[in-house]
Amino acid sequence: MAVVWNYIRVKWHRYQFTRWLAIIFLSIAVIASIYLTYVAKTTDVKGLKATLERSTEIYDVNGKKAGYLYSQKGTWVPLSKISKNVQNAVLSTEDRNFYHEYGFSIKGIARAVLLYIRNRVTGSDVISGGGSTITQQLVKNAFLTQEQTFSRKAKEIFLAVQVENDYSKKEILAMYLNNAYFGNGVWGVQDAAKRYFGVSASKLTVPQAATLAGMLRSPSAYNPVDHPKAAKSRRNVVLSLMVENNKLSSTDAKKYQSTAMVTKDSYSYTSGYKYPYYFDAVINEAISRYGLTESEIMNKGYKIYTALNQNYQEKMQDAFANNSLFPYDASDGTKAQGGSIAINPKTGGVAALVGGRSGSHVFRGYNRATQLVRSPGSSIKPIAVYTPALENGYFYDSTVKDILKSYGSNNYTPKNWNSVYSGNLPMYEALALSKNTSAVWLLNKIGVQKGYDSVKKFGIKVSKSDDNLSLALGGMKNGVSPYEMASAYEAFANKGVHYSTHLITKIVDSSGNVIVDNTKVSSKRIISKKIANEMTSMMIDVYKIGTGVSAKPSGYTIAGKTGSTQSTTSSTSGSDNDHWYIGYTPDVVVATWVGFDSSKYSLQNEGTRGGSALFKKEMEGILPYTANTKFTVEAASTRASAASSSSSSDSSSSSSDVWSSVESAGENISQKASSLKNKAASYIEGLFGN
């Protein structure tokens, strides 16, 4: 054994392993320091105070504040408005050397290292508390996760130093006290003072301040409302710590320790989440389109500017709060649902959005306006059939077939909803009356591929399996949402041009930096202006003489399309799964869906409660707030009637001209005959005399 150790010793000295180990250790330390310094320098520490002072706010299309998001923040108050008792209690409990250290404590770090070693020996891989100064706690809550790992601890220390570089001690303490959690959903010392003692933070007494300071370690365990005994015991410990820290005399401490725990709640929270489904969609767009996290959006004090029109939104929410506008509940009490959206076709901005009935909202839950996936039914016909038909030589009044007919080897046989077939009818009438047989016949004539390509061109996602005749009636593998349908109809409302649909126009961080700029929205021509006008002319008739008559807003002309899908689970004739209403003017596009979330329920004999009354109410609420821009085209039926009258007038005029010619010719013949008679008489008289 001695020989082996001697060999190792010789080799160790010969190759200078001690020096190499020292170099390796120092190199690792230098690299780690460089990395951690980089992390600290690139973190927005200078914006921390501004971030903590305000909630993320939502602004509407006119730049007016519309509300603010939920956040882990309380009512901000400066340190001068926080009782000295609170400061003394917190510093005595959490960090007695706060004013004498630079962001971290050497003793605290040593204690944390020892705890780390102990946990490694016992098989634990986390740091079991200890070692954090107030600055470190602030950094952890503001910038880092709550995981207790060694790497997180190292980042915490370097960030704490950076915070000390950028802020004074008083600013750091104010940020800490305003950002601390005190249980029961209460953040910040001001709201905690109101919630537990009914006073402002500036009025907190010594025992009250000690109670709040004691809650910092475990807000739920030492809550004076839910756990008064534990809270009192913890308060008394804090009072003793204040004595140790020379912030309180022993006599006063004993006096305060003997007082009862008396609470009073004068805290009231006013939610700024005024338009829940719209705000949910804003958060989702910020995450999916711009790469922000929910935590950043909720807590970093952003100003998010949107296309929201508060008048539209309020009217839409009012309609959704009216239960009489919705279908009757299912036999087991299940309620029908709905989703609706309004888009400005001239900008692509989402002006209003509701994703469910009043009282059904869950934060970032199911939003039927944007996340619904259901068949569009006949509301797809203008996009999949009639637009490509016009593009391929058909006219608004071209004759189309309305007959019961089978197609293809699988004998696909579309039927009209009312089983009524006209034989032949003009194209605009087939669209207005939503003739299924005519739509499939027409798609078959122009070619399924053209309809399929048209749907894709309008921005609706389709799969290869959708490339068949059933596409004319909304037969799709994945389905659509009101967001997608309203976005597609933008092109009809805006003379063929489609703007990229969006909610967010700009995001500004708490320091005033623009981090998202979507003020210049891209646009693309989908169809020609002529085709768009022809389609609008045809779709005006949907709400004038067709399937949308009961949903037409009083006093307004709109264009659009309705749609429905038949239930596949109900044995009752005429039962539907989905009802769609899409309508537009040059100023706004509104798409509304009504149905049950589960396909095991169906809409039966609902009348106007099946969606038409809801849509009508929405439109009658929204349209008065628009510019009331008129269509530049008339309804196709009006045009056809005028053309027919003109044709009859021309025909009548033509017949009259012919008869006049005949009469004139007759008169000429008569005159000529009389002249000949007179001449003959004279001639005879000349021959024979009197």
Image: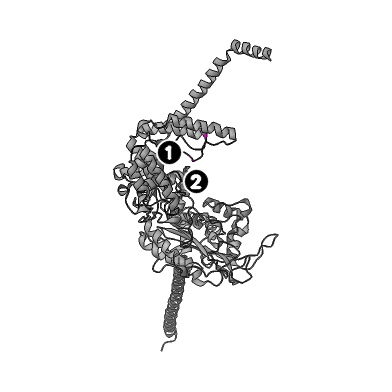
Residue 31 sits above or below residue 298 on the image: above
Q: CA distance from mark 1 to mark 2?
A: 31 Å
Q: Is residue 310 magenta?
A: no
Q: Is residue 164 left or right of residue 641?
A: left
- Which residue is labeled 1 in the image? 137
- Which residue is labeled 2 in the image? 288
Relative image position of residue 245 (x, y in whole percent): 36, 37
Q: Which amino acid lies under the numbered mark 1 shown in the image of this protein? A: Gln
**Residue at screen point 51% across, 63% down:** 337
Seen from the viewer's position, the closer of residues 160 and 522 is 160
Relative image position of residue 283 (x, y in whole percent): 45, 49
User: Dot 1: within a 10 Å radius of its alpha carbon, few (fewer than 14), some, or many (20 or more) residues?
Assistant: some
- Which quadrant: the C terminus? bottom left
Q: Which amino acid lies under the numbered mark 2 shown in the image of this protein? A: Ser
Helix, strand or loop status at disc 1:
helix
Seen from the viewer's position, the closer of residues 317 and 656 is 317
Magenta part of the protein: which range? 139-149
Residue 338 disc label: none
User: Dot 2: within a 10 Å radius of its alpha carbon, few (fewer than 14), some, or many (20 or more) residues?
Assistant: few
Relative image position of residue 40 (x, y in whole percent): 43, 32
Q: Is residue 146 magenta?
A: yes
Q: Is residue 447 left or right of residue 617?
A: right
Seen from the viewer's position, the closer of residues 139 and 588 is 139
Can residue 228 be seen in the rendering of this structure?
yes
